[in-house]
Structure formats: structure tokens, C-alpha cells
Image: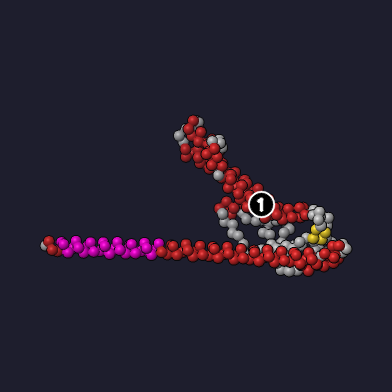
Amino acid sequence: MRFDRYLKGLHAKFIALVCATLLLMLAVVVLMLQRQGAMQHEVVHQSRDSMHALVFERLRVHGEALSAQVADTLVNPLYYFDLDTIGVVARSVLRQPDVRYVLVYDNKGDIIHDGSGDIPTYGKAMRRIVLPQAARVIVPPLGNEFNNMLKTTSLLTILSVQELFVTFQILNANGPLSFHPFELFLACAIWFLMLTTIWSIIQAQIEKRLARGVPGAPPPGGPGLASRLLGLRRPSADIAPVTGAR
């Protein structure tokens, strides 16, 4: 009888040991698969960054070489102020697939030719042409950083600055709603949400305004408010040509 109980106890211990071993092996396999997935994601991310860096570097080198070649070609036409020849050279450069614009300007920064037939930018300062293009690129990341700063203003509590979060903390300690943290900090979160939402709408309007008349720009509707708030905006997979010959 005791021997039977001993066998049953030994059998139970063996089953428990087998189950523990299987669980341990399963945990190791899951950990290895997770590690493998993380390594694959890191390799893909680094490969994508390397390819983008290589493409942009090649575009930059090609743009600099093309700009130097065009500058040498335009020496005589600029000396004699031959706008027709300057226009022919500029239009020949514009026909290349990786060139978006051509601006020929003098030492004062005034535009002489842009490759078009009627030269609408003639005599205009370079900053009036380049600044809108630069603003179209700068506004999205700058607006996102400002939005992040709105959400992280509570870090000013380290410097003893009384901002929105500190104000609600004071109300929770001494105000008429003392010891009601859930209601107070929920209201604080709603205030932060309102501020970031208002800035998201303003940023969307600014981006839409700057993108008017730009080839390849997103449609006038642009990403919706829900897409901006929930982070559902997906960057385009295509690499836009950014090389310009000047």
C-alpha cells in the first residue's frame, strides 16, 4: 500500500517535472522568437536608413556636380546677359528626372532666370522664392515639436514654475475640490487635449496653405483630425526628388 502511494507520488512529481520543463522550453522558444523578431526589425530599420542615406548622398553629389557644370556653361551667357541661352540651358537641366527646379541668380541674390518662358520670378530676391519652399518642409516637424512641448509643459514643475499641471495640484491640495484627484486631473487632461487639438487644426491649415499649387502635394482635404490625433498618418514610401540645380 505504501509502495503504491510512493509510486503515485513519484509519478506526480515526474509529471510536474515534465510540465515545468516543457513550460521552461516554451518560454525559451518564445524569448528566442521575440529576440529574433526584434533583431530582424532592427536590421530592416538600419538597412532602410542606410539605403535612404545612400540615395540622398548620391542625389547631393549629383546635384553639386550638375550645379558646377551648369555654372561653367552659363559663364558666357551671363557675361553677355543672353536670357535666351540662359533659358535654353535651364530648361535642358529641368528635363532631367532628378531636378525639381532651376534658379539662376546674380551676386545680389536676385533671380535672372528660372527655366520658364515668361520668367515670372525675374528680379525677385532669392529669399522670396526659397523661403516658401523651406517653410513647407520646416512647418510639419516644427509644428509637431511645438505640440510635444505643449504636452510636456508639466516638466516645468521641476523649476517651480506654476503652469497648468501645478495649478491643478494646488487645487487638489487647497481648493474647494480638495482630495478629488480623479476629477481634477481628468479636467487637466481635457485641457491639454483641447490645446493640442486646437494647435493640430492650426498646423493642418498652415500645411494646406503652403502646399497649394505644389506638384505631388497631398489633396486639399489632407489627413483628418482623427488621423492626426491618433497618429494614423503614414509617410509616403516614395522618395521625392529634392535635388535642385542653381
Q: What residue does disc 1 label? A: 139
- Does the image show residue 236? yes
The answer to whether residue 26 is magenta is: yes
For the N terminus, give its image quadrant.
bottom left
Q: How many marks?
A: 1
Q: List x then y, in percent, for residue 50.
A: 58, 64
For the C terminus, give its image quadrant.
bottom right
Residue at the image point whose x is 49% and y is 30% from the top: 174
Apparent side of residue 162 relative to residue 97 in the rendered image (left or right): left
Residue 221, by quadrant, is: bottom right
The answer to whether residue 30 is magenta is: yes
Residue at the image point whose x is 65% and y is 49% from the top: 203
Apparent side of residue 133 relative to residue 31 in the rendered image (left or right): right
Q: List x then y, in percent, for residue 196.
A: 59, 46
Q: Would you call the spot at circle 1 few (<14 residues within 10 Å), some (14-19), or many (20 or more)? A: some
Three-letter code, disc 1: Val
Query: Which span of residues is magenta-colored?
Result: 5-31
Residue at the image point whose x is 53% and y is 65% from the top: 44
Q: List x then y, in percent, for residue 206.
A: 68, 50
Disc 1 on helix, strand or loop? helix
- Does the image show residue 100? no
